[in-house]
Amino acid sequence: MEQNMTLTPDQVLAANKANLETLAGLTTQAFAGVEQIIALNMSAAKSALGDAQHHTETLMSVRDAQELLSVQAQMFQPLAEKAAAYNRQLFDIAQHTGGQIGQVVEGQVGQAQAAVEALVNNLTQNAPAGTEAASQALKAAVAAGNTALSSVQKAVHQANEMMQANVSQMAQAVPAAAKARPAAKKR
């Protein structure tokens, strides 16, 4: 009961077409993420230019050192809040784009794992007598590889969750620190 293990030209063509479509989808998602980052950077640059002009005009109207210190302290908080918002938006774009790409990759990995398991099962079922030990070793190696891959995927998800929590903490801490700093300057 030997099965034919060769691929037909149609199967090869279908696999190549599916891989090309996956690559095109990943490329489109990556470019969308890059476009979002470019738009964010352009917006931040325009805002920074407007802020610089406003700050320059404000500083030009300062009459003494005490007023200069006060104006500088007032400028710090909005800048810190904008920097925190920029970092939060940048992280959101990266997380969203990475999440989309990760879903596609995980789906492809799942399909590849299933194909390898089917191939190994087919090989071991049709193996000649006396190769049972080698068949079991092959199955064990594939199972160990799948377990290791699963562990890596879990670790990546945990690292992503930790990063998200850290960004949230930073987003809350920066405005609080910016508010505290002007109070410390007034001493």
Image (cartoon, rainbow, N blue to C red):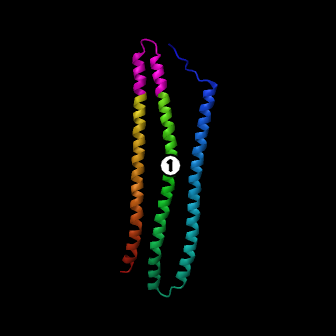
Could you tell me what secondary structure mostly forms the magenta stretch? helix
The image shows residue 52 at horizontal and vertical percentages of 55, 74
Q: In the rendered structure, which segment of residues is drawn in magenta?
A: 117-141
Q: Secondary structure at mark 1?
A: helix
Vertical side of 49 occupied by 136: above or below: above
Q: Check if residue 69 falls in the magenta segment.
A: no
The image shows residue 27 at horizontal and vertical percentages of 59, 46
The image shows residue 94 at horizontal and vertical percentages of 50, 53
Residue at 60%, 27% (x, y): give it.
11
Vertical side of 178 occupied by 118: above or below: above
The furthest residue to the bottom = 63
Residue 154, by quadrant, is top left
The image shows residue 58 at horizontal and vertical percentages of 53, 81
- Name the amino acid type tagged 1: Gly
Vertical side of 108 occupied by 117: above or below: above
Residue at 46%, 13% (x, y): give it.
128
Provide the residue designation for mark 1.
98
Residue 178, by quadrant, is bottom left
Query: Relative to 101, is 177 on the left or the right?
Result: left
Residue at 38%, 60% (x, y): give it.
169
